[in-house]
Amino acid sequence: MPTADPAIQLDRVSRHYTMGETSVRAVNELSLSVPNNEFLALLGSSGSGKSTLLNLIAGLDRPTSGSIFAHGQNIASLSSLELARYRCNTIGMIFQSFNLLPRMTLEENIELPLRLAEVDRAERPARVREALERVRLTHRLGHRPTELSGGEQQRVAIARALVNRPKILLADEPTGNLDSATGEAILTLLRELRSQLGMTTVMVTPERPLAEQFADRLAIMGDGKLLSTTSPKGLPQ
Amino acid sequence: MKPPDLIDLALRNLRESILRNALTTLGVAVGVASLVAMLSLGVGLQQLAAKRLSQSGLFDTILVTPKNAFRGMGRPQREPESDKPPRVLDEDARKEMEKLPNVIEVYPQVRFFTEIRFNNKPFATVVAGMPDSSRNSGSFDGMQGNFFSSTTANEAILQIEFAKDLSEKTSSLIGQELVLRYAERQSLPSAAANTEPSANPPDSSGGGFSVVPKELRLKIVGIVETEPAAGYGGYGNARLLMPLATASTLRAAQVNDLRDIVRDSNAGKTTYASLSVRAKSPSQVEALETSIKKMGFNAFSLLDASKSLRTFFTVFDSLLGIFGCLALAVATLGIVNTLVMAILERRREIGVLKALGAADSDVQQLFFIEAGVMGFFGGIFGVLFGWLLGRAVTFGTNVYLQRQNLNPIELSSVPLWLVFSALIFAILVSLAAGLYPASRAAKLNPVDALRYE
């Protein structure tokens, strides 16, 4: 269950793009607080700015203005190298298209964040096995991603996101490429992991029923702005 | 990321596009091979020239004469005015020179113009005494016949051109005898020293000398194609060589003997008209020359000519190197092309790496290592191909030379410094080629890269 301390604090965050002579306000003066251990679902139609917001929280993009605090650290002011370390140590990310590297085995894919975090070689196999056990895929250690189903690939992606024990898990439409049953299984897994590991989870999804079923809170976005935040039962928060 | 992980990932990436990367590496190898082959020919030619010259003894030998001696071209030497008499080139001086660092040996020059008779025909030539150490100088490598059987043997080795004068079939000369006719010095008693003539050492010239015609039978033991006793300082090239000890005992009148008559008396002491000082290598000649001059003697070497030769080969090697580098320059463009293509293909992968926490420098180093690995393997294969190419050129040249009845030569040489220099150069050039792609990959926006299909 979420605690009162905010894991993520967005303060009047804007992200503007210039396309030719037009300025696009993907995120516009958005403020939002995500408490520790909360499972927040970002909802909105296509082009509402939810993925851009997720990228800003992930440190993959920088805001045009405003500040983003993650566990008390303003990531908007970090250098490129510090942002990379933040992504490596604080954030775990999963994507709609899984983004596993096809030429690597599952073990090697999951080991990749450990290499980036410069974890000792001797410690890595145990960490990889632990991550795979959490997503119940230990028997596919030596397989390549193309030999797995979509659901299994997403579970591997989750294992890869968890292997560095992040404080924040960001999921960009994690069920977008899966059938509904598999999607539900993945979200069930995410919720379990959130409970076990005490992570703050922010998920972008266009599917409101799924969000209502699994998230602690829904944040509705439109035209780059936060329109409302509600409880899964529709109560304003 | 730690270097072992970076190298591991880079090698994995290279293995993924094995054909393309192998072809790029082959391009680097061809470039390095052309560079190595060109330079190996330059080095080989330089070594060939240096060997021929060192065999002549011109570049590692210093000719030492007393300060009151005449210079080779007959010009009187300009001496600063001094009350101190010039130092005598005697046995003490010889021993002192032998103790100088990097001196192999010090021996008197015995070289005289004379006549020999062979088959009752007279032939004029220059005779030179050869020290026993010249046996291993390389000058007599590949000679017909043998070197002198002993240091005091009455034997002769003929220079090929002179041998041709004696007989059209030079090989038939070996074992035959010739008669050396020479003018022997016989010392006259010195009035000042009042010593018995028989007590004077052979080269003592205190009281002047008389000249007596003498003959000596010499057995021809060898014929040499090089010029082991090419002369300088007023002497001609010696065409008849005999053991130095044998030549010394002849007491044959030499060019400088006339000068000794008018020189101050050094009765009772062995003096030399000139001494040859052999250095361990031509590079030590300059320092030795200075030391000998400080001892109060004239010292003369062909160091300047040696310097010019080195300058010529440096320029020659540079030109060959520039031509060799052209192929390597083309190969570097291949590396740039391969890596730029790799960025396009691995755009999404770069995005994933960055999303997982890779710093810009990690991505940059990854591409750098890939370029460096291609350069390393290209360098190794290039050195190998270059060496093979040099051997092939040498082989072809030697086949041609043998058809022309000429001795084979070592045309190319790949010394260790060339191997390592080529390898390091290949890696550096490849890293330079990787600069642009690596920087481009590092600057990729992760959000754009993740969107790339």
Image (cartoon, rainbow, N blue to C red):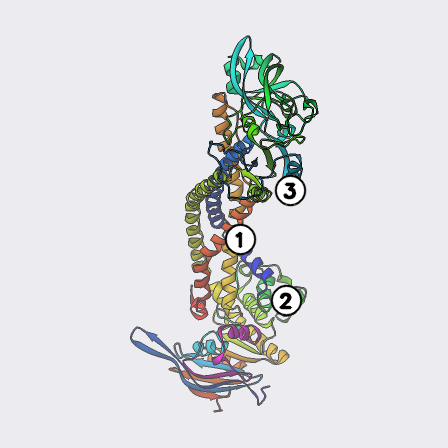
Q: Residue B409's spot in the image, x, y percent?
A: 52, 29
Q: Residue at x 55, y 65 (%)?
A: A153
Q: Which mark is residue A128?
A: 2
Q: Which mark is residue B34?
A: none
Residue B133 placement: quadrant: top right
Q: Is the residue marked by circle 2 packed among few (<14), some (14-19), or many (20+) residues within 10 Å?
A: many
The amino acid pointed to by label 3 is Leu
Based on the picture, tell me whether residue B365 belongs to the magenta stretch.
no
Residue at mark 2: chain: A
Q: Residue B360's spot in the image, x, y percent?
A: 49, 67
Q: Which mark is residue B100?
A: 3
> Real-space Cα distance between discs 1 and 2?
29 Å
**Can you identify the residue that label 1 sits on?**
B373
Residue at mark 3: chain: B
Mark 3 vs mark 2, foreground winner is 3
Q: Earlier in the sequence, mark 1 or mark 3?
A: 3
Q: Is residue B61 above or below residue B172?
A: below
Q: Which one is nearer the viewer's eye here, B392 or A184?
A: B392
Left or right of B136 in this view: B449 = left
Element type at marker 1?
helix
Residue B267 placement: quadrant: top right
Quadrant location, the N terminus of chain B: bottom right
Magenta region: A63-92
